Amino acid sequence: MNRGPEGGTARDPEVSGERAVDSDVSDASEGVAPAAGSRASKYPGVRRLILLRHGQTEWNAADRMQGQIDTELSELGRRQAKDAARELVSQDAVAIVSSDLRRAYDTALALAEHSGLEVVRDARLRETSLGDWEGLDHLEVDARYPGARKAWRLDPTVTPPGGESKLEVGARALPVVRELFAERADWPGRTIILVAHGGLIAALTAALLELPEHKWPILGGLANTSWVQLSSHGPGIEQPGWRLDVWNAAAKVAPDVL
């Protein structure tokens, strides 16, 4: 059973956490020189995008719905962030952009310590606003709003009372990537890392892949400090050609996603 965004690690038998292999990657465009001082990329025209979920909070552990409430990492969450940073430092990143909520920003700072990059905060990467559900645990939401949480998980147009739908979250975050695409001439052949939240990452991934609305629920939950990797193989910003390479990868696989 998947937990909602910010409700803890995922329990999804359909999501293995294993890395996917893209057999078509060899058709990437070429001719873009790598940035000075960077390793030569096997696919110099391809932009890699990693979407990293923040480390655990006490609210995650208690199945309490955070939404945009600004909670902090637990001690376990801080260790998770360091583990993820050691794994992702090999990705040859040129930029780290983070949600401005502390649990994401502090996770991003762990990456910055290993990479030497500065963290840029962007409020558009905040988690889904859950409105009246924020601060409640799953059982409390289900008792007060019978059937609503299930409907919300299965339909990206459903909005929690006083909150925002998954479609709205995707539309909010998509310009962040488009702006990076337009502004970062050093991105081709290298990686940009966005540090955010489970619900936002799923919505942004669906928006980048241009999935039809009824297909959005196929993207299951993410464990804390698990990440998604996409790659852009298209000719430009209007045709980015995003592909999903990895879903729910982790430096250490959480026992409740096996």
Image (cartoon, helix red, strand yellow):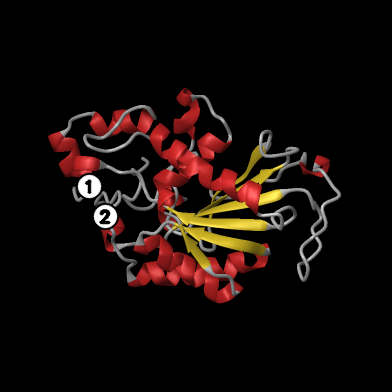
Q: Could you tell which of marks 1 and 2 lies nearer the N-terminus?
A: 2
Q: In the depicted view, which residue is nearer to us: 207 or 144?
A: 207
Q: Amino acid at mark 2?
A: Ile
Residue drawn at x 40%, y 53% is 123
Residue 233's tag is none
Q: Say above or below: 72 vs 215.
A: below
Q: Say above or below: 222 vs 92.
A: above
Left/right of residue 172 with respect to residue 159 in the rendered view:
right
Q: In the depicted view, which residue is nearer to us: 188 or 24?
A: 188
Left/right of residue 236 with respect to residue 145 in the rendered view:
right
Tell me where residue 151 appears, x and y as whole percent.
30, 28
Tell me where residue 16 appears, x and y as whole percent.
53, 46
Asked if residue 13 can be seen in this view, the reply is no
Q: Quarter-wise, where is residue 61 in the image?
A: bottom left
Q: Which residue carries the number 2 mark?
A: 69
Residue drawn at x 77%, y 43% is 25
Q: Are marks 1 and 2 in contact (CB under 8 Å)?
A: yes
